[in-house]
Image (cartoon, coloured by chain):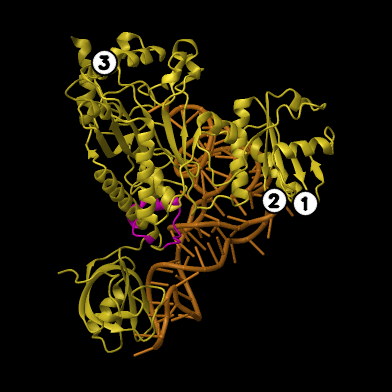
Chain colours: A yellow, B orange
Amino acid sequence: MYRTHTCGELRISDVGEIVTLSGWVQKRRNLGGMTFIDLRDRYGITQLVLDEKAPDELKSLAEKIGREFVLQVKGVVLERQSKNSKIPTGEIEIDIKEMNTLSPSITPPFTIQADTDGGDDLRMKYRYLDLRRDNVRKNLVLRSKMAIAIRNYLDEQEFIETETPVLMKSTPEGARDFVVPSRMNPGEFYALPQSPQVFKQLLMVAGFDRYYQIVKCFRDEDLRADRQPEFTQIDCEMSFVEQEDVLEMFEGMTRHLFKKVKDVEVADFPRIPYAEAMEKYGSDKPDIRFGMEFNDLTDTVKNKDFAIFNDAEYVVGIAAPGAASYSRKQLDALTKYVKRPQVGAKGLVYVKYNEDGTFKSSVDKFYDTEDLEMWANVCDAKPGDLILLLSGDKEATQVQMCELRLEMGRQLDLMDKNEFKPLWVVDFPLLEWDEETNRYHAMHHPFTAPKPEDIELLETEPGKVRANAYDLVINGVEIGGGSVRIFNSELQSKMFGLLGFTPEQADAQFGFLMNAFKYGAPPHAGIAFGFDRLVSLFAGLDTIRDVIAFPKNNSGRDVMNQAPSAIADEQLKELLIKLEAPEEK
RNA sequence: GGUCAAGUAGUUCAGUUGGUUAGAAUGCCGGCCUGUCACGCCGGAGGUCGCGGGUUCGAGUCCCGUCUUGACCGCCA
């Protein structure tokens, strides 16, 4: 038997017991006459001790062990002479009677501790060592607990977990597909799923009624801190439901998760139409942990000779609470921030609404106190606030102000990681005009149902049609999104038409779905959650990499095994030769 | 495809207007130490300053190119 106990469970009540422990050497402290060894496993750390009276063979064995050796130790649980209140096992130690090295270790490239000396690159190269660290492992434990809580909730609600194919058909819409050549079908390819969308709808046609799956999805697009080429979704679909039923069901799931996993009661799930979110926050995923909502000043500021504002399509202001004390240096830094190419503003106008009620602005040349007072009124600013204004093309300015608002939220420390403010964004536009291809494309996906009251606009003003689509946003992170689906093959054909498919193309791509809808399709709706993002939100992290056991780096590379890699000529031949085969016919 | 930042000891970093033999901490190795738990003390080894080119009497430092890593923009129905 390798162990009778883990390294985290022995307590003062176990004193006198003879135990066997196995684990990794965290640290050896040799004090001359006696040696302490910290033995670690995923449950904790237990101190082992060898004193002067220990047999020489044990002493000399102890001299040879280093960090990260795997040891097996048999000994007696003793009460410590000097206790350590920092760890749960700190009142006891193990007097070593027998010890053997199960596996030695070369010196690790970084230390296995919370504040490791390893940089990101090194940690990823030796991810198996990084995962030994407490704070990385606990993220994966959290992930496991969350997955179980989700399964329990959905199981209780009669959802059926069903697996769908990983090798499937490529579709041109949406993100770039990862593609897998088929050896048996020369010149043809599978695609890895970007989402099991079509399959889950077919499961509804099959009468499964409530489906879910915690499932890997794949998108061949550039990475970000919150985007990996393979990621995990909680994919759900329900039949005989309207939008309201879906929102309530998954509000319930989210509440259940917060309660079970974090013991947090989430107050409420406000809803905001997409159009309003854009007006108030310039974003379809606003962080509502803090205010600083947008105020439209376009008409208010056009009464003087300030050409920049007079010529602007849109002028917007926010009042940053208590920031009137900002120094010239801080204001310059803000200006620089919004002028970065990633934000792209031309400049920044500020108005300090001082504590004593006076105003100081960067446009004092053009506007008097009366004007600035009016601005402050519109922005609902109080003495001590800093009013920040951006202007220009409406769409671009909204995006820029959104960035500035978030930056101010960070600077003023208004984003508390332990506060959770969910929000449903609803009534998304059905279609989006794409300048590049000069046609509409689906904002969500082509199976999304338009709002019934907007259906007549489909012919006349497709851009104005709203969809029964919804996103769950928590603390400014897009956690989930879904929609009510089209379940009528005629409307689905019409949608494909609007999206620029010829009937032949639509039939080739999605004929099987429209065909399925002819055999009695139930009304259905669904949602998918980004599981990695949800876990990282719960863990208080800004990146999803640390909630994934073996993530990819910025270039989509696994720096541990160097994937992707070239493949053997033999492998390649099998595929390439056959790729040429059709031409020989 | 683009913008920005970083790359110096095993590791995390410092390195001034270009100027002796490139430093610190930690880790590693050796010695001492009976209550440590970030053990302590003494000593030691350890460097192609990412790579290539240029400017200069002289480059870790300045210039050009390139590679790698990270953040972001584009992209992500």
Numbered badge on residue A355: 1
Three-letter amino acid code at disc 1?
Glu
User: Which residue has dot 2 on it?
Assistant: A322
**Callout 2: 10 Å neighbours few (<14), some, many (20+)?**
some
Q: Do labels 1 and 3 share a chain?
A: yes
Tell me if A232 is positioned left or right of A297 in this view: left
Tell me: A182 left or right of A433: left
Label 1 lies in what chain?
A
What is the chain identity of the residue bearing mark 2? A
Mark-to-mark CA distance, 2 and 3: 59 Å
- Who comes first in sequence, dot 1 or dot 3? 1
Instruction: Give the structural element (helix, strand or loop) at label 3.
Output: helix
- Magenta span of residues: A114-134
Q: Which residue lies under the disc numbered 3?
A: A511
Determine whether the residue tagged by mark 2 lies in a helix, strand or loop. loop
Q: Is residue A265 above or below residue A200?
A: below
Position of residue A432 measured from the top left corner of the image (x, y, whole percent) = 48, 21
Figure quadrant of the C terminus of chain A: top left
Instruction: Please tell me if label 2 and label 1 are on a single chain.
Output: yes
| Residue B76 versus residue A435 in the image, above or below | below
Label 1 crowding class (10 Å Cα cut-off): few <14, some 14-19, many 20+? some
Alpha carbon separation for disc pair 2 and 1: 9 Å
Q: What distance separates the C-alpha of mark 1 from that of mark 3?
A: 67 Å
User: Which of the marked residues, 2 or 3, is nearer the chain's N terminus?
Assistant: 2
At 35% from the left edge and 20% from the top edge, which residue is drawn? A172
Residue A423 is covered by the magenta coloring: no
Q: Where is residue A257 in the image (x, y as percent from the top left)?
A: 36, 50
Secondary structure at badge 1 equals: loop
Quadrant in the picture for residue A526: top left
**Given contact means CB atoms under 8 Å apart, are the residues at marks 1 and 3 in contact?**
no
Residue type at numbered disc 2: Gly
List x then y, in percent, for residue A422: 46, 44
